[in-house]
Image: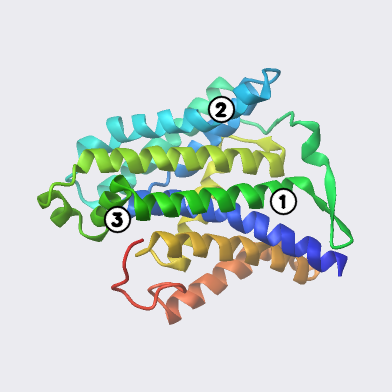
Amino acid sequence: MSQVIQYGVDAISVGSVYALVALGIALVFGIMRLVNFAYGDLVMVGAYMLVALEGAPWPVIVLTTLLTPVVISLAMDRIAFRPMRTSDPASLLIASFAVSYLIQNLLSIIFTPTATSVVLPAFVSESVGLFGVRVPLLSLLTIGLDIVILGALASFLRWTSIGLQMRAAAEDFVMARLLGVRANFVILIAFAIGGLLAGFVALSFVSQAGTVTPTSGVMLATIGFVGTVLGGMGSISAAAGGGFLLGAASVVLQAALPVSLRPYREVFIYVAVIIVLILRPQGLLLRGYQEERV
């Protein structure tokens, strides 16, 4: 029973982090139809702030980790994507790869291309009692933080004027512009929110991994994209759900597979994703192709 509870907490914790990654990718995709493969590198920018500011007060480190990806995300939009607003999706995709490689190489030059350990506060390694077993405090904090973030973002999109404009732009960008929605402003907000989510993911990812490398963002971007497709690319909430399912499945397979097969866990996951998309091309969490993008 203790192992079941432990694996259950781990599945929810990892799944919630993957949900935030998928959500950050889906926000921009819903408006611009841009699959931003540089999103994982935004996470790494935030992660390396933990390395650069080692020894500083933790409130300063956390705030910098959250805000730096926002600034880089806004600069990314202004420099790389805004001049290509009218370009086809393939050109935007190539631009996102170029930005990704640029960030990776800058991180390698500024820091190091090899893995770097991150000094974390002592409470990260603590555990608490839950239903008679010891559960890592970090997992519980990650779950709680991600629930708050997802709830706050859902409320923002549903109940605020800017959120309504973003939903309208995701539904029909051309019509939204004709009705007075400020296109550049809405896209700017989407990139800013995506950058902030990347900062939160950086904190969660580094706390769980303990090390960072300049190329770790590639894996996160792939996971976010696959989670978005798995849940349904026509809906922000479905994309987050797909990311959660992908993370939970990863932990469950790690526990269920024999030791000899655990190195091939990702193979089983992506084969399952391919089968799902063959049977349900619209994704697991959409009832059809014409769902509301919320």
Q: Position of residue 37 (x, y in %)?
A: 42, 46
Q: Amino acid at mark 2?
A: Leu
Determine which residue is flagged by label 2. 63
Q: Residue at x 67, y 64 (%)?
A: 265
Q: Residue at x 20, y 43 (%)?
A: 183
Name the one closer to the observer, 115 or 199.
199
Q: Position of residue 107 (x, y in %)?
A: 53, 27
Label 3 and label 1: CA atoms lie apart by 31 Å
Q: Secondary structure at mark 2?
A: helix
Looking at the picture, does residue 39 appear above or below residue 59?
below
Q: Position of residue 249 (x, y in %)?
A: 64, 67
Question: Which residue is situated farthest in the right direction here?
Answer: 132
Question: Which residue is situated farthest in the top direction here?
Answer: 56
Q: Residues within 10 Å of mark 3 (few under 14, many from 20)?
A: many
**Image mark for residue 167:** 3
Work out whether mark 3 precedes mark 1 in sequence or the reverse, and give the earlier one: 1
Label 1 and label 2: CA atoms lie apart by 21 Å
Q: Residues within 10 Å of mark 1 (few under 14, many from 20)?
A: some
Q: Amino acid at mark 3?
A: Arg
Colour convention: rainbow
Q: Secondary structure at mark 3?
A: helix
**Image mark for residue 140:** 1
The quarter of the image holding the N terminus is bottom right
Label 2 and label 3: CA atoms lie apart by 28 Å
Find residue 170 and report its image quarter: bottom left
Q: Is residue 112 visible?
A: no
Work out whether mark 2 precedes mark 3 in sequence or the reverse, and give the earlier one: 2
Q: Is residue 249 visible?
A: yes
Q: Residues within 10 Å of mark 2 (few under 14, many from 20)?
A: few
